[in-house]
Amino acid sequence: MSQALYEEYKEALRRGHVAALRGRLDVAEAAYRAAAAIAPDRALPYVSLGAVLRRAERIDDALASFGVALSLAPEDEGALRGRAELQAERGRRAEAALDFETLAGVLERAGRLTDAADAARRALELAESRSRRREMERLGGLLRGSGEDRDAVDALDRALRILEAVEAPAEPAVDVAGAAPPPAAPGASSAADAGSAPTAEPGPGDVARQEPEPGVPAPPPDPAVLRAVADALLDSGDVRGGTERLLALAELHRAAGRLDAAMDACLALLVLTPSDHRLQREIAAVQLDRGWTATASEKLRLLARLADLDGDAEARSAIAAFAAERGLETPPGSVPAG
């Protein structure tokens, strides 16, 4: 994508975000469709479009848009949740349950056990099955371990109520020959129960969460999980927490050479905190990695002027340090890097 085309894409997303925030759904729809036409391989415009269409009560169109987004990014939280809720409203219980089940896995990998339990509960409510009951019980065990979290305890209580509501006697297993298995020996039931009860021994999930060995670098976070966490924080009103995650996501993508994805993360944040100096420096870093040196240098010059006007010495020092790190001339007015 050329720089000029990318600027069109960025501007279309910005128009859509602003219009959606102001409730101008028709304008937002047109803007997101324009962004999708420019970059049809990116999920963000389709997720945003689906949300706008849902608000406009155009359910079939919203479902189609979420479907396109998930074909591009199968673990996108916004698309999964949006489609699941719409499917549930339409009475498509099995399809909705599958989406909530997938969402629960995404949220658990993000470390959001309360939200994961809620998603798993929704899946269980919509389409009860033994596998979903076992998954709910597993998440319940994890939530018991985080009993100090009030939200986690509440989610566990909700989950347990659902389990009690769908409790049904299990049918005896039948072997290949069609005969039922022999009755269990006395004491076997209690032994089995004891084996299934939570113990202090770490399971596979606990091992995965153990501290890394000294000298062994921790693996980088999953970008999809990081984005899901950022979106959830922003949805809950935690702009600061969402900002930190989106900035980390942009840096992660840029370090891996995924410059388009890095800029997408910046754009998602731009509408919320356009004056954040760290965000603007990250955008400049992506521009430099693309070879757009003149554009990035101009951005740094403007940032230095804004920092001077605001009297923000910390920002000015950071701009100077960034310029020195990237081999650029220190913008006029900024504090030289020490």
Image: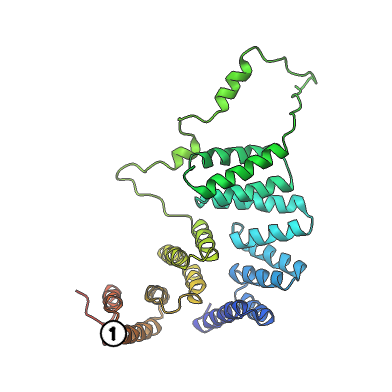
Q: In this view, does 27 lie above or below 153?
A: below
Residue extending farthest to the left is: 338
The amino acid type of the residue labelled 1 equals: Pro
Mark 1 surroundings within 10 Å by alpha-carbon count, few (fewer than 14), some (14 through 19), many (20 or more): many
Which residue is at the front of the view, 15 or 234? 234
Instruction: Residue 335 in the image: state x and y as whole percent.
Output: 23, 81
Q: In this view, does 18 lie above or below 246?
A: below
The C terminus is located in which quarter? Answer: bottom left
Instruction: Residue 186 in the image: state x and y as whole percent.
Output: 64, 12
Give me the residue at 49% from left, 81% from top. Answer: 3
Q: Can residue 132 be seen in this view?
A: no
Give me the residue at 71% from left, 46% from top. Answer: 125
Give me the residue at 69% from left, 68% from top. Answer: 65
Instruction: Residue 318 in the image: state x and y as whole percent.
Output: 29, 74
Question: Residue 182: which quarter of the image?
Answer: top right
Instruction: Residue 39 in the image: state x and y as whole percent.
Output: 60, 74
Which residue is at the front of the view, 298 or 276? 276
Question: Residue 82: which quarter of the image?
Answer: bottom right
**Is the image coloured rainbow, by chain, by secondary structure, or in one colour?**
rainbow
Q: Name the residue under label 1.
A: 331
Give me the residue at 63% from left, 51% from top. Answer: 119
Q: Taking 174 as reference, is 148 left or right?
A: left
